Image (spheres, rainbow, N blue to C red):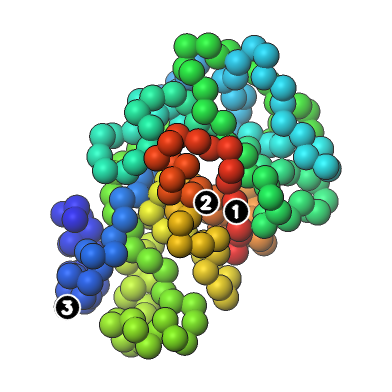
Amino acid sequence: MAADFAAHVAELGLGEHRGYLSEFARPSIEIITADAPVIKGCSKLGGSPDLPTDFKWPQHKLGPYRFIGQVNLADIPKGPHGLPDGGLLSFYYAHDENGESFWGDPDYVRVYRFDINALKPIEPPAAVRLGSTSTIKFQPGADVPPWPWDDSAVKKWPISESQRDAYWKLRCRLHPSGRYLLGYPFNTTLAYDPTPGPEWRSLLTLSSDDELEWCWHDGDWLVAFIEAARLRAADFSQIKSDAG
């Protein structure tokens, strides 16, 4: 368990639950805005993706997908996170002006993995050429589960209702940027666990952002999930998502 994780647990008065939280903690990777130029193959949010020359821009039933960002996997610090060692992950979502695309639909989020050496910048279609661009860097950390959604789970939960605010603050401290890879899903309005099933893991979590022109579920969070076996196999062809 990372030292800063343990410090947050203690400072927020949750020290008695440190063993329990350590047992369920998962590696996460915080996404942090970087003061670096945009160059080919860099990790970034927004802007123009780096793509193979023969790549066809993905389309959904209401128009073109919008580029979220890209992660150069060589930029990820080594650790027990389970991400592939190399290549570039490119993330997209089914944007449309009228908000008719639903974040729970199949393929609402799509992810591609490319060979870094065979790419060039490709400008998005005009309809999805939105928001700012920023380079990013990554900081390894740990994450703990959201507060349980249903009464049966709450009964097994060792953290008392009086500590609920402290637990919320812990999760916020673990994700100060509002953007991270892996870990557990984050939400503010959902009344259920968005994880598709026990074999699924959070891949990417993003808060809404005015500069990037992201608004998930009226200003909440977008979470994309991948099956654990597919993550181990570096297969990003099947992604599920939710928002709230």
Tell me, yes or no, if residue 69 can be seen here.
no
Looking at the image, tell me whether mark 1 or mark 3 is earlier in sequence order.
Answer: 3
Q: Secondary structure at mark 1?
A: strand
- Which residue: 37% across, 88% down? 155
Residue 76 position (above or below residue 120): below
User: Which amino acid does the dot numbered 2 rest on?
Assistant: Phe
* Label 1 crowd (10 A; few <14 / some 14-19 / many >=20): many
Circle 2/circle 1 CB separation < 8 Å: yes
The residue carrying mark 3 is: 16
From the image, tell me which residue sits under label 1: 241
At numbered mark 2, what does the secondary structure look like: helix, strand or loop? Answer: strand
The residue under label 3 is which amino acid type?
A: Glu
Q: Position of residue 61 (x, y in %)?
A: 83, 42
**Direction from residue 37 to residue 101 in the image, left or right:** right
Q: Nearer the viewer, residue 189 or 199?
A: 199
- Per the model, the C-alpha gap separating discs 1 and 3 is 34 Å
Front-lying residue, 231 or 38:
231
Neighbour tally class for label 3: few under 14, some 14-19, many 20 plus, Cα within 10 Å = few
Evaluate if marks 1 and 3 touch, with contact meaning CB atoms under 8 Å apart.
no
Q: CA distance from mark 2 to mark 1?
A: 6 Å
The N terminus sits in image quarter: bottom left
Q: Residue at x 28, y 34 (%)?
A: 77
Point out the tag, 2 or 1, that comes first from the N-terminus.
2
Q: Earlier in the sequence, mark 3 or mark 2?
A: 3
Q: Which mark is residue 225?
A: 2
At label 1, the amino acid type is Ser
Query: Residue 130 is drawn in which quadrant?
Result: top right
Determine the CA span between mark 3 and mark 2: 31 Å
The image shows residue 39 at horizontal and vertical percentages of 48, 17
Which mark is in front, 1 or 3? 1
Q: Which residue is depicted at the point 19% across and 53% down?
A: 2
Q: Which mark, residue 74? A: none
